[in-house]
Amino acid sequence: MDPQSAKLIAAGLAAIAVLGPGIGLGVLFGNAVSAIGRNPSASGEIKSTTLFYFALIEALALFALGMAFILKSS
């Protein structure tokens, strides 16, 4: 296997890592909507916590995409 093929395979595998944060975001927002539906008076606290965790999860996805692009371009 030549090095260029190995780089492309590695970039593809790094891009697969975006699936985890995608699933995590779905679970996070699904549970947030459910929690707000059960206790509407706590919606402010739930929303702020949800946005904080959204930023953390999204950062993981951006790191994975960044690694994929770095592997592809090198």
Image (cartoon, helix red, strand yellow):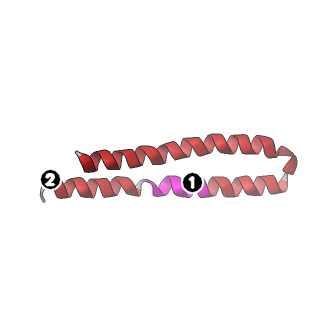
Q: Horizontal placement of 52 versus 34: left or right?
A: left
| Of callouts 1 and 2, the N-terminal one | 2
In the rendered image, the vertical position of residue 48 relative to residue 16, given as above or below: above
Q: Magenta part of the protein: which range?
A: 18-26
**Three-letter amino acid code at disc 2?**
Pro
How many residues crowd around disc 1 within 10 Å: few (fewer than 14), some, or many (20 or more)?
A: some
Which residue is found at the position 80% from the left and 46% from the top?
43
> From the viewer's perspective, is the residue at label 1 or at label 2 nearer?
2
**Residue 13, position in %: x, y?**
33, 56
| Residue 65, disc | none
Q: In this view, which residue lies farthest toward the left?
A: 2
Asked if the residue under mark 2 is in contact with the one under mark 1, i.e. CB atoms within 8 Å, the reply is no
* Secondary structure at numbered mark 2: helix
Quadrant (top left/top right/bottom left/bottom right) for the C terminus: top left
* Secondary structure at numbered mark 1: helix
Q: Horizontal placement of 56 versus 31: left or right?
A: left
Residue 31, magenta (yes or no): no
| Residue 24, disc | 1
Which residue is found at the position 68% from the left and 58% from the top?
30
Q: Main secondary structure of the magenta part?
A: helix
Residue 20, magenta (yes or no): yes
Name the residue that disc number 2 marks.
3
**Residue 38, position in %: x, y?**
83, 55
Which residue is found at the position 32% from the left and 58% from the top?
12
Rounded to the nearest angstrom, the CA distance separating label 1 from label 2 is: 33 Å
Quadrant (top left/top right/bottom left/bottom right) for the N terminus: bottom left
Q: Horizontal placement of 62 versus 44: left or right?
A: left
How many residues crowd around disc 2 within 10 Å: few (fewer than 14), some, or many (20 or more)?
A: few
**Three-letter amino acid code at disc 1?**
Gly
In the rendered image, the vertical position of residue 63 relative to residue 1, given as above or below: above
